[in-house]
Image (tube, rainbow, N blue to C red):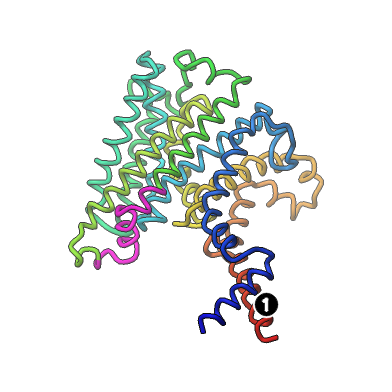
């Protein structure tokens, strides 16, 4: 029986043109090699000159494209921070934008209103990144389910309303706060230095991916998954579901606050949108679009969402849409409608998100190989 199994394995390997040991080694290193290859391409992207029509506004290393790609990367990192709550732990939060806005506004106030140096502003951001999610999580997690979502929404709305009223002239009201770029290193200011801001956003995303990957494979991540599947069973086993969920809120809030600080540097200011419920709902859409709880779902969803949002805004005012009949022109000129339609289609045809499509393709390929190997053995 063992010899027969070995023969079938060898025959299947020969059908793919590779020895069995080599194919097993490739399968083992593939999950590491592919992300490293993509990272290498992203690092050297500012030195490349090629165009992606319909996706980027110009050549890849042009200032406009670098700015858009930087926004994609930092948003992907923030979406990954939200996935720690929703995808990994099963916590539906409507107030995650509070952490993002806190990172942006605290740094903008420290650098602009208080005139502090960059290291002091970073210290202020880190303090908010730890204290704010710890306090909000400790209070909001006293309730469960939709009640938790409502409490987080109440916190976010309270801060957003306070910021809009511009207390003491600190927040700038509806106009927001511009970034005091004179307090930043010269390489982070100016149009010609867009690649450096792109690399900063890329570094932030890499940190988010590494932190989430490490925690997910550690005991903390296993506890998150257990709470997501059955919180009552976790309590029966002697673990504290409250502390587990609080850890998730702190990690997600910490990364989200850092993301707000990086986004402040990229877009050049803090605005009320960073505190709005609309941003939190957008993060929820990104996570579901890419695949909640999957390894790369939130990252892919964040990048795709920002690209679609940006390009659809330009497409809605283009002459191509203006020349269409009214029954097509009116809906297609509304980017939110098009984004919503695409989201519905993805959820309907790929409930597991965009990453689930790749998994489905791999399973079909593996099934075909197995059937081919079986047919060869029958012959």
Look at the picture and state if 138 lies above or below 23.
Answer: above
The x, y position of residue 290, in whole percent, is 53, 54
Look at the picture and state if 119 lies above or below 261.
Answer: above
Which residue appears at 62% of the width and 57% of the height? 341
Secondary structure beneath label 1 = helix
Which residue appears at 43% of the width and 33% of the height? 260
Segment colored magenta: 213-233
Front-most of 324 and 129?
Answer: 129
Residue labelled with disc 1: 372
| Residue that sits furthest to the left in the current view | 238
Question: Seen in the image, is 226 located left or right of residue 139?
Answer: right
Question: Seen in the image, is 301 located left or right of residue 315?
Answer: left
Q: Is residue 349 visible?
A: no
The x, y position of residue 99, in whole percent, is 37, 38
Front-most of 315 and 256?
Answer: 256
Q: What is the quadrant of the C terminus in the image?
A: bottom right
């Amino acid at each position: 029986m063992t010899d027969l199994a070995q023969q079938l394995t060898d025959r299947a390997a020969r059908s793919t043109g590779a020895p069995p040991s080599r194919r097993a080694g490739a399968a083992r290193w593939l999950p590491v090699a592919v992300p490293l290859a993509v990272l290498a391409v992203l690092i050297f992207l500012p030195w490349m000159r090629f165009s992606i029509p319909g996706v980027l506004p110009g050549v890849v290393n042009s200032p406009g494209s670098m700015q858009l790609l930087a926004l994609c990367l930092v948003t992907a990192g923030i979406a990954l921070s939200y996935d720690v709550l929703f995808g990994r732990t099963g916590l539906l939060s409507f107030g995650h934008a509070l952490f993002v806005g806190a990172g942006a506004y605290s740094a903008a106030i420290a650098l602009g209103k208080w005139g502090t140096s960059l290291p002091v502003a970073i210290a202020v951001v880190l303090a908010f990144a730890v204290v704010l999610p710890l306090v909000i999580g400790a209070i909001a997690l006293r309730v469960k389910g939709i009640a938790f979502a409502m409490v987080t929404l109440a916190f976010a709305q309270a801060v957003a309303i306070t910021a809009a009223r511009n207390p003491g002239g600190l927040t700038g009201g509806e106009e927001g706060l511009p970034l005091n770029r004179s307090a930043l290193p010269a390489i982070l200011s100016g149009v010609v230095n867009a690649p450096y801001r792109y690399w900063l956003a890329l570094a932030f995303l890499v940190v988010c991916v590494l932190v989430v990957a490490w925690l997910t494979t550690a005991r903390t991540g296993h506890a998150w998954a257990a709470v997501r599947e059955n919180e009552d069973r976790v309590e029966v086993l002697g673990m504290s579901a409250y502390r587990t969920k609080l850890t998730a809120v702190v990690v997600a809030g910490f990364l989200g606050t850092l993301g707000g600080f990086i986004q402040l540097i990229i877009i050049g200011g803090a605005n009320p949108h960073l505190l709005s419920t609309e941003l939190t709902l957008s993060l929820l859409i990104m996570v579901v679009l890419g695949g909640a709880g999957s390894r790369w779902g939130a990252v892919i969803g964040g990048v795709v969402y920002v690209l679609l949002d940006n390009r659809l805004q330009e497409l809605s005012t283009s002459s191509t849409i203006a020349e269409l009949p009214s029954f097509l022109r009116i809906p297609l000129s509304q980017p939110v409608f098009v984004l919503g339609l695409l989201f519905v289609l993805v959820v309907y045809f790929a409930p597991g998100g965009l990453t689930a499509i790749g998994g489905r393709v791999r399973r079909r390929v593996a099934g075909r190989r197995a059937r081919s190997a079986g047919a060869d053995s029958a012959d």
